Image (cartoon, rainbow, N blue to C red):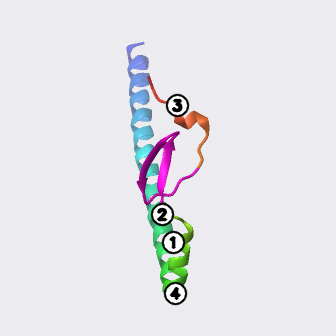
Amino acid sequence: MCCVVSAIGLINILIAQLDVAVQAQSRLTESYAVQNRIHLTLEVESALSLGTRRKIWDDMQLYEPLEYEKGYLGPAGGVQCLEPALVMVHPK
């Protein structure tokens, strides 16, 4: 009986270790994917003329401050996107 309990305990520890390793590998893979997308974006942007790049940056209005909450303007230079209301719930 003791051997069975010990074996089950060791298998649980092994599964937990494998789960941690898979999660770490997943984060690493995701960061490589983001890095690759950034590299491709910069390659495409470098092929554009300076006038076209300036027009794109001006259309993005990065010089205007972002509104984080009603009545609160943050710093300029960001890109704002809408998120679901569940993301905005603050932990208590």
* Residues at marks 2 and 1 touching, judged by CB atoms closer than 8 Å: yes
The reply to whether residue 69 is visible in this rendering is: yes
In this orientation, which residue lies closer to the viewer: 2 or 67? 67
Q: Which residues are magenta?
A: 63-81
Q: Residue at x 43, y 19 (%)?
A: 4
Vertical relation: 13 (above or below) 76: above
Foreground mark, 4 or 2, reads 2
Other residues around mark 2 within 10 Å, as few (<14) / some (14–19) / many (≥20): some
Mark 4 and mark 3 lie on one chain; the one further toward the N terminus is: 4
What's the distance in space between the residues labelled 4 and 3, CA to CA?
43 Å
Element at label 3: loop
Q: Quarter of the image for the N terminus: give it.
A: top left
Residue type indicated by callout 2: Leu
In the picture of the structure, the residue carrying the numbered disc 2 is 62
Q: How far is disc 4 from disc 2 in space, using C-alphas? A: 19 Å
Q: Nearer the viewer, residue 73 or 55?
A: 73
Q: Residues within 10 Å of mark 1 (few under 14, many from 20)?
A: few
Q: Provide residue 87's location: percent of width, then percent of height.
A: 55, 37
Report how far apart the C-alphas of labels 2 and 1 lie in the structure. Answer: 7 Å
**Amino acid under disc 3:** Val
> For the residue carrying disc 3, how many other residues have a C-alpha within 10 Å: few (<14), some (14-19), or many (20+)?
few
- Which percent across, then down, holds residue 83? 59, 44
Quarter of the image that includes the C terminus: top left
The mark nearer the N terminus, 4 or 2, is 4
Marks 1/3: CA–CA distance: 32 Å
Tag 3 residue = 89
